[in-house]
Structures are given as structure tokens and as C-alpha cells.
Amino acid sequence: MMKDNIREILQKALEIGRAEIPKGKVATYIPELGKARADALGLCLSLSDGTVYKVGDTNLRFTIQSISKVISLCKALEVRGTEEVFSVVGMEPSGETFNSIVELDVRSNKPYNPMINSGAITVESTIVDYVSFEELLDYSQKLCNDPGIALNREVYYSELTSCDRNRAIAHLLRSKGIITTNIDTSIELYTKMCSLNVTAEGLANLALVLANHGVNPLTGERLMSPETARIVMSIMLTCGMYDGSGRFAVNVGIPTKSGVGGGLVAAVNREMGIGVYGPALDENGNCIAGCSILEYLSQQLGLHILN
Ligand code: GLU
């Protein structure tokens, strides 16, 4: 049930988020990302009855980055099945940064989870021979209810020519027999998926489909099984916010995934989808304004999963 003063709450949330921006930094390790406007900020709530609340820069396009890991995981679970996917990737938080390679070599053969780079590249390798990029793009457009999503070529080439670390991860995974398909095609698919241009509004719609257990309530179309939605939301809750996932689960309690482009996608079970855009990131690589915004909304609207 939405509160009467929802618009006031959203404005206040935006102010709280804006105050955090000076403490954050735009990602520059992918050179093109460094061009983002650090002070951009948008928040969108999408409800099952079709109501949409928007404040700030909700229609500004930015690259989805790691949030594409959610989409690829949904597709992989649908196409390859749960058993096949989790035979090559785990479901546990890694305790390391998103692009870490060290734990793979010394602690575990399987990537810890599908929300870190090693796990996501592995997930792409499970579908690369079954699903084309065009099909994944179409799936992303449907999930986000946004036919305008397209590949951002500048960001794609910027990352493809600077992703030595991801290539190193992929080579290590192949040496361990976890990746058995062509490395270059898996890296290309992963990097293309990270380079899709989305909006905060589109992310709110993606979250709404997950929160609604796989059906887009606006069109009635089922886009994944309820089991896939449950698995993906569970992994977002435990591993979606990099090294800040534990604290975020305590303080906010909403399955959420972030991307270094500044996006956040947050699925409030059975209730709504939330999308945030703000490219200034905290030390864990999460949208700094978005974390405070979601904490405030969780308190004000009673959205914590254990409420
Ligand atoms: N494309 C980015 C990378 O592989 C995604 C990272 C992220 O958003 O966490 O480094």
C-alpha cells in the first residue's frame, strides 16, 4: 500500500542521496565511463498496477554494466537449467572485489557466485552457443519494457580494449575446465551485455518483473519461471552489492544489484521495482547516493524483506 505522501518521500530521498554525491567517485577504469556527469541522479518506482513514480534523471541513458549479470543469469537458468548452471558457478559471497582473480586460483575452482566477474563470464560461457547477443538484447528490452535499449559502442570498445583482467579470469577458468567454450566469444558477449544503454525507469521495470516472480504485470507476459526469479533475487540479496552486500542486507533488506555505470536495480518482493541512476560510486563500487536513497525508502515505506 503506497503512502499518500509518497511524492514528498521520494523528493526527500533524492535530497538525501544528492548530499552523498561529493563523497563518491565516477568509475574511470573503463575510460568511457569516466565521462559520466557525477551529479546525475534519478529514482524510479514501478508498481504492479502500472503506477510509475519518477524523480530526477530517470530517462538519462547509461550503461547497465554488472546489472546485466542479473539478465544473463535469468536467461542461463531458463535455457540451461539450474543444475547445469550451478555445476560451474557457486552461490556464495566471495569476500573479494568484483574482479578478483586470487580466490579462484587458491581457494576454489568454481567462481563463488554469478554476480562477480568470474561468475558472470562463466554464466555467459554456458549460453554463448545457445543464445545470440540479439536474443539477449531483445530479452533485456522486454524485461526493462524499453525498446530503446541498444549497445553503447563507445563503452563496448572502450572496455573490450582494456579488459585484460577479465580475459585473465577467463583463461584461468578455462585452464581449470570451468569454461569449455571459446573464451573470446564469452568475453565479447559479457562485455556487450555490460554495454547496454538503460535508464533508471527501465531498471525499475526489470526489478518489477523479478518482484512479480517472472511475469511483467504491465503486459501479462511471463519472462522467466518463478523458480528463476526466486534464485536470482536470493543471489542479489546475498551477493548483489559487492563487498557491501552484508551491510546492505541489514540496513536495506531489498534484493539489489549494482553496476559500476551507476545503476541500481532493487526488487521489492510482490510489491514494486526500484531503479536508481547515480554514477558517483562508494568504495565498494556501488552508487553512493542510491545506497542512502534505498536505506531511506526501506525505512519510510517498510520495504525490508524481514519486516
Ligand atoms: N563491465 C564491468 C567489468 O567487467 C562491470 C563491472 C561492474 O559493474 O561491476 O569490469
Image (cartoon, rainbow, N blue to C red):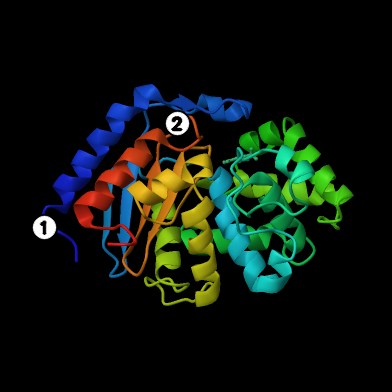
Q: Which percent across, then down, holds residue 306?
A: 32, 62
Q: Is mark 2 within 8 Å of ligand 1?
A: no
Q: Residues within 10 Å of mark 1 (few under 14, many from 20)?
A: few
Q: Quadrant of residue 88?
A: bottom right
Q: Which SS class for mark 1?
A: loop
- Circle 2 sits on which residue? 282
The one nearer the camera, 200 or 127, is: 127
Q: In the image, what residue type sits under mark 1?
A: Asp
- Circle 1 sits on which residue? 4
Q: Quadrant of the N terminus?
A: bottom left
Q: Left of 195 or right of it: where is 306?
A: left
The one nearer the camera, 264 or 147, is: 264
Q: Quadrant of the C terminus?
A: bottom left
Q: Which percent across, then down, holds residue 20?
A: 32, 29
Q: Left of 100 or right of it: where is 196?
A: left
> Which mark is on residue 140?
none
Residue at image position (68%, 44%) is 191
Residue at image position (71%, 42%) is 103
Mark before the other along the chain sequence, 1 or 2: 1
In this view, the residue farthest toward the left is 4
Marks 1/2: CA–CA distance: 32 Å
Vertical position of residue 220 compared to residue 35: above or below: below
Q: Left of 259 or right of it: where is 89?
A: right
